[in-house]
Amino acid sequence: MIKSNKAMTTNLKKQSYSDITKGILYATITGILFGLEYLAVSWVFHHQSTNFSALAISTVNYCGAFLLALFFLGWRRDFWKRVIPSVKNHYIAMLSVGITIAIGIFLLFFSVINSSAGSTSLLERTQLLFIIFLGVVFLKERLNKKQILGIIISLIGFIGISTFPSDLSSLVICAIISAAFLYSLQSFIVKKYVPDVDGLVFSFVRAGIVSIILLVVFLIFEGINAPFPSISESILLALAGFFGAFISRYFYFEAHNLLPISFLNIFMLLEAVVVVLGEMLFFNFVPFSWTKIIAGSIILSGIGILASSKKE
């Protein structure tokens, strides 16, 4: 059964300086790694050998991530001793997260195919609005004035960097916002129903559930003969998934033990900064823009204010 964590009202002032610092570090690592995963997926789409689908890329990305995680952790008996009781206690929460993320990752990669990684990453950051709402209204989280200022500045930078292409279709916009809502539900479920979450175990089980769902759906709707990424593309996608969908999620879930979700998810704006600047400066997928450089700097300034607020 899902066990509700009734003691959910979170006040940063009650937490130790070291815990908050660690939570900020974990959230920062998550944002950067997830952004790099987006860039890898974007690169594959721009250089793909065959015209494969969003479902195919999602399946390779997550199955590859899970197989690599299984390779590194599957032989450790002490790890399985942590997995089994965690699954018994939180299997409903794990299944709920797995289903929502399987749908969410498909919607995100569908959007990348039909727009760009930068546009998808930017609009997907609207999940911050869902998360702040869920955290403040349902989890009774409270933020101090300096943290609210940091959030406002970061959101101003987000608006400045979010210059979406005019041909972004209504279908793609709906897909991205739907994915954003599903990802915000993940954070809410973990924070409310999995107190003291074991980040490594939860990331591992999550990757396994998502992989199984995507693989089954792919085989049913597209079949084994459907266009598929090449070996080199599959390796890149698997590595990207391992760092973006597994390693980064370990840090992300561990951060849930240390920070309110309305606070830690602001650091996920780093993902959008990494993706937009990466596409613009290194891949030349989008034109160079000083507006986006300045907006990215504003986002980082807001995050800096949030990071410094831990001292209060």
Image: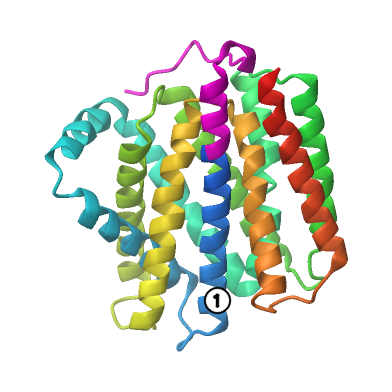
Q: Where is residue 219 shown, x and y percent of the image?
A: 30, 70
How many marks the image carries: the answer is 1
Residue 112 appears in which quarter of the rendering? bottom right
Q: Is residue 219 visible?
A: yes
Q: Is residue 225 above or below residue 19?
A: below
| Residue 21: in magenta span | yes
| Residue 23: in magenta span | yes
* Residue for point 58% across, 11% down: 14
Residue 236 appears in which quarter of the rendering? bottom left
Residue labelled with disc 1: 43
Q: Hey, which residue is sitting farthest bottom in the picture?
A: 49
Q: Is residue 5 above or below residue 95?
A: above
Q: Where is residue 84 shown, x and y percent of the image?
A: 19, 33
Q: Amino acid at mark 1?
A: Trp
Question: Which quarter of the rendered picture does the C terminus lie within?
Answer: top right
Q: Is residue 99 above or below residue 171?
A: above
Question: Which quarter of the rendered picture does the N terminus lie within?
Answer: top left
Q: Where is residue 133 shown, x and y percent of the image?
A: 68, 29
* Residue for point 63% across, 73% down: 114
Please state which of residues 1 and 50 is positioned toward the viewer in this rendering: 50
Q: Residues within 10 Å of mark 1 (few under 14, many from 20)?
A: some
Residue 115 appears in which quarter of the rendering? bottom right
Q: Using residue 220 as the reference point, say whether residue 107 is left or right of it.
A: right
Please state which of residues 255 and 48 is positioned toward the viewer in this rendering: 255
- The magenta-colored residue range is 1-25
Q: Is residue 226 visible?
A: no
Q: Secondary structure at mark 1?
A: helix
* Residue for point 37% across, 70% down: 221
Q: Where is residue 125 shown, x and y percent of the image?
A: 67, 49
